[in-house]
Amino acid sequence: MRTLIAGAAMALSFGSAQAAIQQEAVTYKDGDTVMKGYIVYDDANKAKRPGIIVVHEWWGITKHVHSEARRFASKGYTAFIADMYGDGKTADNPKDAGALSGSVRNNPAAMQSRFVAAKDLLSKHATVDASRIGASGYCFGGSVVLDMARAGLDLKGVAAFHAGLGASAAPAAAGQVKSKILVQNGGADPFIKPESIDAFKKEMAAAKVDYSYLVYPGAVHAFTNPEATEKGKQFKLPLAYDAEADKQSKAAADKFFSSVFAK
């Protein structure tokens, strides 16, 4: 059972009065689990538009995820920042982040249920054309959106940035995947092993999935996140922001979503 508890708990405006990006905090439920997400859209646009579910990194919902959602809103979409951990939980260190992300990755049924709760909420928003829903995920979130495509959810397209490629449950099966898929990873990301790339490409080919796999030479993990370099230094992890890879990957994602949402 998925119920909306309270919508528009707060609203923030970004940009000019002529084109204000609205961000509304939304508390909703997946079963007994309370979730805390955000709807983000441009209120200057009065037309129904595609919706994009934005799935956070293993840290939880951070400044970076809010920025990504606002960017999608500025491109004419309504974005929904999904809460995959419940109660808006976040982590400020790798141990806690690993525990939170692992609790979801190791429970595929809960992962799908929480994602579907977010999808249902976004689909019902007044600004959204429910027939055109996609998803974008980052690191942990990228793995989530790939798994949701594998599960056969009705998504026009999913874009995964610096994402792990292994399936948490069943791999993609021929005829099951409805989504087009875009994966964008750093060529120097030590978390993405060559054998996992080969296995992913073979999986997609065997399932006859319409997918693209883009590599950014020299980029490491979390290359779209401006806070990644500091986090990498703090915890001695191979994380770093790459401005050029960020720019190119966003342009590729924009082209991808424009194509999959075309009527």
Image: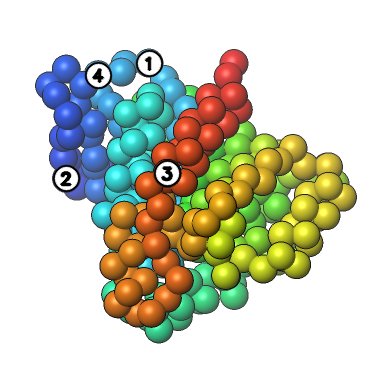
Q: Position of residue 85 (x, y in %)?
A: 41, 67
Picture residue at 25% right of the left edge, 48% below the top:
25
Front-most of 192 and 63?
A: 192
Q: Earlier in the sequence, mark 4 or mark 2?
A: 2
Residue 68, relative to residue 127: is it above or below?
below
Picture residue at 39% right of the left edge, 62% below the top:
240
**Marks 4,3: beta carbons within 8 A:** no
Secondary element under disc 3, as helix, strand or loop, is helix
Measure the C-alpha gap from mark 4 to mark 3: 30 Å
Find disc 1 in the rendering and name its residue.
47
Front-most of 136 and 22?
A: 136
Measure the C-alpha gap from mark 4 to mark 1: 9 Å
Badge 3: how crowded within 10 Å, few (<14), some, or many (20+)?
Answer: few
Q: Is residue 30 visible?
A: no
Find disc 2 in the rendering and name its residue.
10
Quadrant of the image containing the C terminus: top right
Residue 261, relative to residue 182: is it above or below?
above
**Marks 4,1: beta carbons within 8 A:** no
190 relative position to 20: left or right: right
Mark 2: which amino acid? Answer: Met
Secondary element under disc 1, as helix, strand or loop, is loop
- Dot in front, 4 or 2: 4
Measure the C-alpha gap from mark 1 to mark 3: 33 Å
Measure the C-alpha gap from mark 2 to mark 3: 34 Å
Badge 2: how crowded within 10 Å, few (<14), some, or many (20+)?
Answer: few
Mark 4: which amino acid? Answer: Ala
Find disc 4 in the rendering and name its residue.
44
Find disc 3 in the rendering and name its residue.
244
Q: Position of residue 7 (x, y in %)?
A: 26, 44
Residue 49, relative to residue 109: is it above or below?
above
